Amino acid sequence: MNLANEPGSWDKDFSHAYLERLYARLKRDFDLALLGDASEEDSAHDRPRAFVRHDIDVSLERAVELARKEQEWGVRSTYHVMLDSPFYDVRSERSAAAIAEIIAIGHEVGLHYDVVARKTKTVDGVTREKDIDSACKELASIIGRDVRSLSFHLPIEELIRGPLRVAGRVSGYAKELFQWYLSDSRARWREGDPIESLGMPRGKVLQILIHPIWWGETDMRPAERLREWLLGLSGRDAYEAMRAKLWDHIIFRAADP
């Protein structure tokens, strides 16, 4: 059993085949750009512009799989990694290799900033922005290039629809990038079938958030997808020990399939 959907939300297909169709529609109707290239002038372009963003909450390996698929489909996108994920160590050699591959095949890597892990949820804005800058510089030292964009993990209200740049980097939660926003958070699309949603524009700048963990060669229910991934780590013991932490981390609650 899975989480009940919100009225109007859609969760019928999380396969790579569906995602390929979604990307084909994006390529047909939009100019695709990396999030770090966003600007105040995007809405003035003759052709609509779209930014594809991926927040890597739990698995760099799943992100690499999706990055390879996007390369096959002729899509470049932006991957945001966490410095403080409880499920991967961005400073490890394995993670470094995964990130290097994502960059090498043409994608952007930025920061997925966690106010809880960084202990900045209740601090003043100036203090938080200094820590964001510090975190971006740390990530830059790890990946060997500047961090040009960022997003927030489970953001607090004051960070949503904020300025285009935070600590000098493009924010995925900027008001300019939130006027038309589609997301598969919690493994459902709030606005309905995303391909159909593309035919009902709400502006000339679209940001679409896709979490790699939900997608695979075949469609699978979200709780099953998480279970499959956890069991693949080191078997049943790891699954039992980590599943509550995982669902807390991504704010997804579902009965064990």
Image: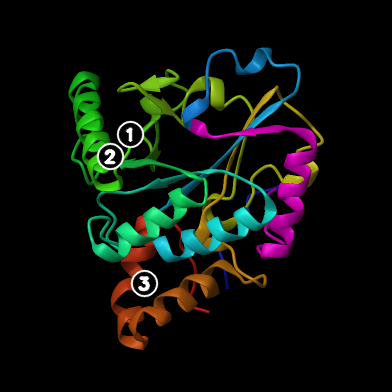
Foreground tag (3 vs 1): 1
Q: Name which residue type carries label 1.
A: Asp
Task: Using residue 256 as the reference point, say whether residue 127 is left or right of it.
Answer: left
3D distance between C-alphas at marks 3 and 1: 34 Å
Q: Name which residue type carries label 3.
A: Arg
Q: In the image, residue 180 lies at what x, y percent?
A: 64, 29
Q: Is residue 13 visible?
A: no
Earlier-in-chain disc, 3 versus 1: 1
Earlier-in-chain disc, 2 versus 3: 2
Q: In the image, residue 159 lies at what x, y percent?
A: 38, 27
Q: Name which residue type carries label 2.
A: Ala
The answer to which of 19 and 37 lies nearer the viewer is 37
Disc 3: which residue: 243
Q: Are marks 2 and 3 in contact (CB under 8 Å)?
A: no
Residue 146, labelled with which disc? 1
Task: Using residue 26 as the reference point, say whether residue 5 is left or right of it.
Answer: left
3D distance between C-alphas at marks 2 and 3: 31 Å
Residue 130: quarter of image? top left
Earlier-in-chain disc, 2 versus 1: 2
Q: Total number of numbered labels?
A: 3
Local packing at callout 1 (Cα closer than 10 Å; few below 14, some 14-19, many 20+) is some
3D distance between C-alphas at marks 2 and 1: 5 Å
Locate the N terminus and report the quarter of the image it occupies.
Answer: bottom right
Q: Secondary structure at mark 3?
A: helix
Q: Residue 13 lies in magenta, yes or no?
A: yes
Name the residue located 24 percent from the left edge and 29 percent from the top edge. Answer: 133
Q: In the image, residue 55 lies at what x, y percent?
A: 45, 48
The answer to which of 252 and 197 lies nearer the viewer is 197
Task: Give the magenta-colored segment's residue range.
Answer: 9-35
Foreground tag (2 vs 3): 2
Q: Are marks 2 and 1 in contact (CB under 8 Å)?
A: yes
